[in-house]
Each structure stands twice: as structure tokens, then as C-alpha cells.
Image (cartoon, grey):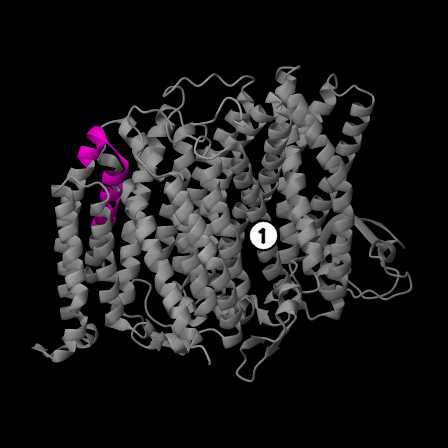
Amino acid sequence: MDFDAVLLARLQFAFTIAFHIIFPSFTIGLASFLAVLEGLWLSTRRDVFRNLYLFWIKIFALSFGMGVVSGVVMSYELGTNWAEFSKTASPVIGPLLAFEVLTAFFLEASFLGVMLFGWRKVGPGLHFVATVLVAVGTLISAFWIISANSWMQHPTGFTILTDGSLRATDWMAVIFSPTFPTRFVHMTLAAYLTTALAVGGASAWLLLKQRAQPESRMALRMAIAMFAIVAPLQLVAGHDSGKLVLEHQPLKTAAIEAYWKSGPDQPQSLVGLPDREAGKTRFELAIPGIGNMIQGAPRDQALKGLDAWPREDWPVVGLVYWSFRAMVGLGLAMIGLGAWGVWLIARNRLDGSVWFMRAAVAMGPAGFVAVIAGWIVAEVGRQPWSIYGVLRTADSASPVGAGQVSASLLAFMIIYAIVFSAGAVYILRLIDKGPAPDPEPLPHGEGRAPGTALAAVPAEPEA
Amino acid sequence: MTLDLPLIWAALIAVAVLLYVLLDGFDLGVGILFPFARSPKDRDAMMESIAPVWDGNETWLVLGGGGLFAAFPLAYAVLAPALYLPLILMLLALILRGVAFEFRLHGRKRGKAFWTAAFAGGSLVAALAQGLVLGGFIQGITVRDGRFAGQPFDWLTPYSLLVAAGLVAGYALLGGCWLVWKTKDELHGDARRWTRIAGAGTAVLLAAVSLATLTVHPRVAARWGFIDGQVSMDVLPFLPIPILGAAGLLIVVEGLRRREHGMPFAGAALIFLSGYLGLAVGFFPAIVPPDIDFRQAANADNALALMLVGVSLLLPLILGYTAWVYWLFRGKVGGDEGYH
């Protein structure tokens, strides 16, 4: 396969997986949020929780559908575009992906049907169980996919046979590779944070339109509590993750921080334009003397710079550098928003604070951007390897020509653009309409179209 | 006792693919029949009959792809590039029809019309693309050094187009039978008519595909005992397979005649089972016809063993709750009895 086809295949994978990750990041958190809402509704019988559940389940159904169909693509794209990777990696991570399907996808898909359409067919308790199972399924799915990806970042528990093929020697070391536990926590927190910000942004939008709306007031408070707690935790998890990168993938750290030269007492680059050709950062603003401290290393310890590796092994430094800064910058803004929100709640001034509401609306999509930026750091930072140190991306591709790859890339771009814009419009419309304050009583056989998520919602939970 | 892991996995993947074809087959079939519905109300009822289960049905496709990756990586790595364009076409079509389930409810006038068309068109194109994949697969794949070594359009032949047409008719038959089972009144009557037409189409096309396979692909014909125009006794053990298909067709016809509601679906499933077994006879033990057999393509034994532990615990559970979901949503949809 020629160079252009590899590059096109990479673009296609980057495009389809970046599109896909938007939805799991949202639905992992939203499924848990819905489980909490339904649990609160069943235990307190307060209408506000039911109305919020019925509101967010509609947005969940839309997002989950887009996540499912864009996810099916991934399970075939590994073969269509990355056949050599599949052959090489399968003996080790094949079971992980198979377990993802068996433990997570079936669970989610089956109980989603009950969750959306089973209102009058199962009791409230069993319906709650279905919601919880969907939420658990999303987390199990994240477990396996992060496990497989962590192995690609820092492969352990395998051996290379004389014919060049891989064999697992220790399954626990494969599944729980050193970076996995921290990265799993990091991704789960990211999903919760993304959802909390989206819920907060939507609620703030509705409160800006109509101040006293009880559902949005409740949801905004729940969202603030969530991101005020999770955002600082994420800083800790992210920092731990960074330390593991330094330990296991020092080249990625060098790209993230634009360390061009190895040595002790690295500076902390804040902003600048990394120039890969020249091997330096232009227009750089850096704080000397604190780089090692930020990495959690003693000041006199030498940290490897990019010069420690041959240039053909370097990732695209500028992209990694800036994606990392986007992620961290947004993370810090989330911590700030959380602190501000808690302060306003403590002083009982949240409802009147138009500026906080506007800021929450502006930060509504921040989680999605941060998640994508974080994955760019992880994936582009691993280049030019698909399995770090084992298999190069250039040797991972399928024997297909640039024509097929570019035609399919174009088709994906068109279809995804249509699906994404329509989905975004429908979700934003729903958000703009807001939760129904008092769902209309459901006369027998009238009201909502059959087949809709709400076709059979009871007005009251039946005991 | 040592387990023949590759053989067990070949059986498991074969069952997963068959379940996929039967389950997603009927909901794709409902999509193919969508343009023939009399009214928006009928279309809503058709959608309602599959909305709670389509996602689970499609998960068998993910198990097919993921399972092939995990159990027979060489087959996965050869077949996917060889069938690149029809696979991508299938994925794109499945995307459009998959999101249509939700998007149709949220679109306004033009949006709703667009997603209605996307559901019907996506279902049809996905079925066609799967037929092209199947046709390309039966025809055989050019392999050199464990890699696909053919041309991008190898899969596109009159034979594969015939297979694609047959699969569309077959899915329409499954969809029609499903609707006979799940709907009532006027829509039920329409579904009976669609089932008759799709059943006739399936019978003709299945016969045509069988004949074409035996004449165009001597390799497959030899398996069935037809060599150089001579029929040998080798054909005898396989005779139950076409008989099974004929019995299935008879059950569909008889079910419709007796105005049974569930019986035609069982007959259609038998027709698919017969076609599936018939194909399997043609190329087993090859997993990438004609050159790679399932043992060559199998993953490392320790990977297969680990997955077998998982699958023997999880598959009964999955089948159990899948059956429970179908049981939960049993009975007729639509009409005037309200929303249950």
C-alpha cells in the first residue's frame, strides 16, 4: 500500500472515530444521569425527577442511536483499512474486543429497547433495572475499549514468536496493562464531566429564557455539583495519566511539552508554535525551571527530549502540543466554572446570576472538545506506531488503493455531515423546548405517535 | 480431552451470522417494504413493530465482524479489504436507516419525509450490499501471501448481482412474514400480499442462484456431487437441504392460506436455514474461498480458549435476555388498541 493510501486511511479512521467518540462520551454519562434521575423519582416520587428523566431520555435516544451506527463502522473499518494491524494484534487484543461485544453491546442494545419502549410492559422497578443495566453496559464497553487501547499504547503480557506473530503470555497483563487503570478512570471522568457540562449548559439556557423553571433549576444544581466534584478529580487523574506517559512513552511527553533537547531542568512551555523541521518552538512563552516539577520529577533528573529519538519516529509535534493545551485549558476552565457555581449556590445567588448562566451555556460543549483533544494527544502522540514499539502504522494498513480509501472517506464525510447536522438540530430543538413541566395526561390511545420513546409513559409510577 | 477450538469457533461464528441474517433480515425487510405502505399510520406501525429490537438485532452484525477479527483474524484481514466497497456501502446504508428510527420522530414535514426515505433506501441498499458481499465471498477471493491480492471490483459480477437480488427478496419475505405476525387489520392484509409476492420472488431467485452457483462455480458444484455434467451419489447426503427449503416455502404458502399469523415467519426462517446450509456445503471448511480454510485462519489457541470461557458463560445469558425482550414486546402493534 502506497504512502497516500496510508495517509488517507489514517484520515478516514481519525474522522470516523472522532465522530464516534462524541456520542459515547455523552451517553456514558447520560445513562448514569438517567439512572440517578429514575432512582430519585422512584424513591421521592417528585415530579421534577420524572420530568427531567422524560426530557433527557429523548436526547439520550438520539445520541445513543448515532453512537450505535457510528460504532458498527469501527468494527469493520479495522479490517477494511487496517488488515495488517488486525492480523498482528488479534492474538492479543482480539478477546478484549470480543468481550466488549459480549458483555456490553448486547446488554446495552437489548435493555435500551425496554428502557425506551417498555414503560407499560414492565413495572417501575424493572424499568429502573433496565436503565441501570444500560448505564452499566456503557461503562463495561468503555472498560474493554480503553483496555485494548492502553495495550496499544504500552503493550505488555505478550511475546513475539519467531515468525513475527504475537502471542499473549499473561492475559491479566494484557487486560490490565500499566496505563489502563488510570486511563479508564480518566475517560470515565471525562464522560461524566462532558455530560455534566452539557446538562448544565442546556439547563442554564432554559433558565435564561424562563427563570423559575423548577426542572432546569434542579438539573443545573445537579450538574454543578457533578462538575464541581469531577473536574478537580479529573485534574488528578489527568496528572497521573501524564506521569504514566512520561514513564512508558517518554517520546509522547517530549512532544506534548515540546522538549526538543534532553536534559535536566526542563522549562514548562505554555504557548508557542512548535516547528518540527527546525526542531524548536517559535514565539514561545515558557517558564524556566518548573518543567520537571510539573512532570513530578526531581529538578536534576534528565528528561528525554525529542533529540533522543530519530526524527522519523517523531509524532506531529504541533498537533500533540496544541491538543494537550486545549484539553488542559478547558479542564481548568471547568474547575473554575464549578467553583463559581458552588460559590453562587452557597450564597444562594445562583438563580439571579445571568453571567454564570451565560458562562455555563458557553461551556456546554467544552467536554466534547476536551475529549477529542485528549484522544488526539493519545493517538497522534503514539505515532508513527499503531502498537507502540511493535508495529508501525505504515505497516498496519490493508492492501487497498488510494482510490477506494478516498472515495469511502468522501462518502463518510457526506453522510456523517448530514447525520450530524440533523442530529444536532433535533437535540438543540429538544433542549430549546425544555422539559415538559406537567406531561399531559395520556388519554387511552391518543397523544403520542406509536413507536416513540414516550408512547407509553405512565403519568405516575405504579407501585 | 482436547477441544477442537477452531471448529467450535467456526460453528459459533456461523451461528452468529445466521442469527444476524434472520434477525436483522426481518427488520431490514420491513424497511424494504416501507415504500409500499398505504399511509403514514401504517408506516408508524411497521416501525413500532421493530423499534424495540432492531438495535439488538444489529449487534449480531458487530459480533460477526468483531468475532471474525477475534477468532479468525486472517479471514477478517483478507475478506474486509477484498469486499471493501460493498462493506463500506453497507455501513453507510445502515447508518442512514439506523438513525432514521429516532430522526423520523423529530423531523418536521420535510425532515420526516427525508428520514422515511432514508429508512427505506438505507434498508434496501444495506440488503443489496450484503448480497454483493455474499456473492463476492462465494465466488472466491484472490489471495497471495496471506493478503488480498485481487482487484477493487472483483466482487462485482452478474452472479453477485443475482445473489444481491435474491437476498433483497429474501429479506422482504422475512419482513413481510414479521408484519403478518405483528400487525393487524388493513396493514396485516397488505403484509400478506407482500409476503406472497416476496415469497414467489425468493423462490425463483433462490432457485436461480442455486443453478447459477452450480454452473458458474464448478468448485461448489463438485462439492454437491455434480462433476462434468454427471451427478454422483455424493449428492445424496445433501438432499435434505433443498427439501428443507421446499418445506419452508410450503409452510409459508400453507400458513398464508390458513390465515395463520406466526407460521409464515417460521417457514421463511426455514428457507433461510436451507440456503445457509446449502452455501456452507459449497465451501466448508474454507473460510475464505477457495484457498484459506478455517484452521489456517484461526487465532492462537490461548485466545480462542479464553474467549470460549467467556462465550460459554455469556452467550446463554445474551440469548436469554434477548428472548425475554422479544417475549416482552410480543403481540400485535398499531391499530386502535392504544399503546399497551
Q: Is residue A155 visible?
A: no
The quadrant the C terminus of chain B occupies is top left
In the picture provided, is A281 more to the left or to the right than A423? right
In the picture provided, is B152 more to the left or to the right than A257? left
- Position of A290 relative to B235 (above/below): above
Spot the residue most to the bottom.
A162
The type of residue carrying mark 1 is Ile
Give the structural element (helix, strand or loop) at label 1: helix
Spot the residue most to the front.
A463
In the picture provided, is B285 more to the left or to the right than A121? left
Magenta residues (range): B168-190
Dominant secondary structure (helix, strand or loop) of the stretch shown in magenta? helix
Instruction: Estimate the x, y position of residue A235 in percent, counting from the top left.
Output: 77, 46
Residue position for label 1? A140
Residue B40's image quarter? top left
- Position of B114 relative to A320 (above/below): above
Which one is nearer the viewer's eye here, B186 or A96? B186
